[in-house]
Structures are given as structure tokens and as C-alpha cells.
Amino acid sequence: MTSLGKVRIIGGKWRGRKLNVVNDDSLRPTPDRTRETLFNWLQGSINGARCLDLFAGTGVLGFEALSRGASEVLMVEADPIIADSLRQSADNLECNTHMIECVDALNITEKKPGNFDIIFVDPPFKHGYIEKCCQMIIEYSLLKPNGMVYIESEKDVKIPSKFIISKETQTKQTRSVLTKLEKSI
């Protein structure tokens, strides 16, 4: 049996609810303080939003978005055990406004997901995923006009120039930015 850890939803209708998550060294849940900052940034935009959570991992960004009023979240997770854990969390929350796709995040366009108001890009560090995801977002028009992309990365990762940073915060090891596409400004 896989051992489980917990993450907590910090706002909205599921505030305080804890989600079981697979204990896996590859998972790096977004800390509570960073999530609080992110959802303060998104406060006027999250209600009714259609969201894409690439590299969903624990699912905490997607479930937090749903808890705070997003209309729909597509969670993308390549690891089948972790994807099953996400499904279990959704069942425990009695959540029916989500979809979980067990595919590599860079292959989600094969599922023809449409486009989104908010995209969360929080990949494993040190793999060069940020640039690839940003290219995919542009190439496949995954972002609606005036949509936003949240990127969580190592501090030294360069954000592609077509993504204009509107908000930014950093910790010792992590950089979190909220961006819009250049043409969306």
C-alpha cells in the first residue's frame, strides 16, 4: 500500500479540508502562504473560471481553485498512482467540476482540451518544462484572451518574453509569477 501525506485547502467552500496525497519525493505541494498570495492575485478572476492544472501532483492548486469558485478544472498528471490519488480526493470532496487526465502534460493537446481562463504551470524542477509549456500554451492557443498563467519555478528560470509578469513573489528556492500573454494585454 502506498503511504499517504496530507495537504490542506486554505480558502473557499472546502477551507480546512485535508486531502490525502501520495508520499512521493517528486511531489512539491505549493506552500499555504504561496497559495494564499496566488489566490489573492486571482481574487477577481477565479469565480467562474475554466482552469488547467498542468503537472497537477497533489492537486492542491486545482482543488483550491474549485473551492474558491472556478467553474471547472482540468488536472493533468502523468503518474497513474498520483492521478488515482487525485480522483480519490475529488470523490472525497464530492467534486464533479473537474476532469483528471493521466497523460504527460506536454501531450495534453492531443486530448483537445479547448482553452482556459487560468493555467497553472508548476512542474518538477530542473527539467526545462517551463519553456516547453509556455511554447505549447502559445502554439495551441490554450489561453483565452486576457487569460492568466501562473508559473512556479526555481528562482533562476527565465520566463519567456511573450509572457508579461504582472505579479511576482519569491522564497529562498522558488519563484512564483502571474503572467499574461503579450497579445492579451
Image (cartoon, rainbow, N blue to C red):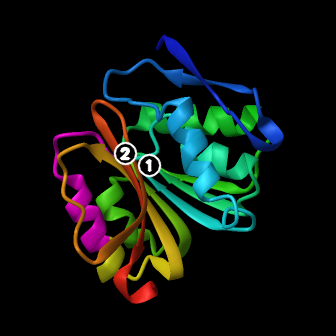
Q: Nearer the viewer, residue 160 or 139?
A: 160
Q: Would residue 106 appear left or right of 63 to someone viewing this image?
A: left
Q: Residue furthest bottom?
A: 183
Instruction: Kindly identify the amino acid type of the residue bearing the numbered disc 1.
Output: Cys
Quarter assignment of residue 45: bottom right
Percent across and percent down for residue 101 are: 49, 53
Quarter assignment of residue 7: top right
Percent across and percent down for residue 57 are: 44, 38
Helix, strand or loop under label 1: loop
Figure check: 91 above or below 112: above
Q: Is residue 99 located in the magenta-colored stretch of the structure? A: no
Evaluate if marks 2 and 1 touch, with contact meaning CB atoms under 8 Å apart: yes
Q: Residue at x 50, y 34 (%)?
A: 58
Percent across and percent down for residue 139 are: 29, 81
Q: Residue at x 55, y 40 (%)?
A: 35
Q: Is residue 132 located in the magenta-colored stretch of the structure? A: yes
Q: Residue at x 16, y 52 (%)?
A: 128
Instruction: Kindly identify the amino acid type of the residue bearing the numbered disc 2.
Output: Ala
Q: What residue does disc 2 label?
A: 78
Helix, strand or loop under label 2: loop
Q: Residue at x 54, y 33 (%)?
A: 33
Q: Residues within 10 Å of mark 2 (few under 14, many from 20)?
A: some
Q: Nearer the viewer, residue 160 or 7?
A: 160
Q: Would residue 89 appear left or right of 128 to someone viewing this image?
A: right
Give me the disc on residue 73: none
Give me the disc on residue 102: 1
Q: Does residue 114 appear in the picture of this structure?
A: no
The part of the chain drawn in magenta is 123-136
Q: Residues within 10 Å of mark 1 (few under 14, many from 20)?
A: some
